[in-house]
Image: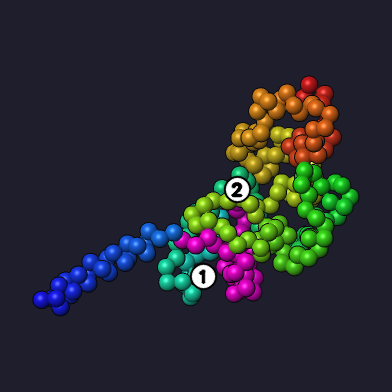
Amino acid sequence: MANHLFKALIPLLILAGAAAALSAPRKPFSHKYHLKQVTSCENCHKEAAASTRAEDNLLPDNMACVTCHDEVEIGEPNKSGVDRFNHSIHVEMGNIAALIAAAVKSKSYLGDNPPAPEALAKIQDPCTACHRGIPESDNVPHGKKTAAHFPHMADCLVCHGEIKPPDSCQKCHVETTKNFRPADHTAEFADKHGDKDFPRQGCAVCHGRKFTCKGCH
């Protein structure tokens, strides 16, 4: 009797185990670990080097993962806010870390938090000159969209230095310029941005290298 009861319960136990596996939280994705298993970023992001459109899906396909993983679920790529971008042209330039470092040293880098030239000098993979921090990335939550390792606009402006908004913006940001107002540009920001100690280096990213207060006021 007990044997027959156990056999009847087997399908239920299998279903319960499968449900538990599906509902179990997935581990965060580790670029750091996976870069130890492959020789370069292109091993997984196979389409990146030949991509000519910003809307191309450059995430790995399932076949890049199934050699090690029985179950693979890859979501949609992040929306970058860029409408025109050609990876293939930029890949031909090679490692541009030295160019960014030179801009930082000459104080022509427009970002408020420029990368350290010493860290840039250690970059070997051309991809990580723009997608910085990827080799150390160890905790990308499953299913979460993050732009933490996207290039900064100040990186782009090292080479693309002509800033005449909005015309120059629309060379890359065709549809998204209307949503470019930063989240911190609130009514309170309007009162504080004229303060003596207000940081203004990053303003040039949007307003141009030669912007002045009188340009808006």
Question: For the point 87% across and 47% down, which residue is it?
Answer: 107
Q: Is residue 82 visible?
A: yes
Quadrant where the C terminus lies? top right
**Above/below status of 208 relative to 17:** above
The residue lying furthest to the bottom in this view is 3
**Above/below status of 196 relative to 73:** above
Residue type (three-letter) at the residue carrying disc 1? Ala
Q: Is residue 134 left or right of residue 1?
A: right
For residue 80, the mark is 2
Residue type (three-letter) at the residue carrying disc 2? Ser
For residue 23, the mark is none
Question: From which residue to which does the magenta span run?
Answer: 26-55
Residue 52 colored in magenta in the image: yes
**Position in image of residue 186 (x %, y %):** 65, 28
- SS category of the residue bearing label 2: loop
The residue lying furthest to the front in this view is 2
- SS category of the residue bearing label 1: helix
**Position in image of residue 59 (x %, y %):** 54, 60
Q: Is residue 166 left or right of residue 117?
A: left
Question: For the point 32% across and 62% down, which residue is it?
Answer: 19
Disc 1: which residue = 64
Question: For the point 65% across and 54% down, which residue is it?
Answer: 149
**Position in image of residue 179 (x %, y %):** 61, 35
Q: Residues within 10 Å of mark 2 (few under 14, many from 20)?
A: some
Q: Quadrant of residue 161?
A: top right
**Above/below status of 63 relative to 145:** below
The residue lying furthest to the left in this view is 1
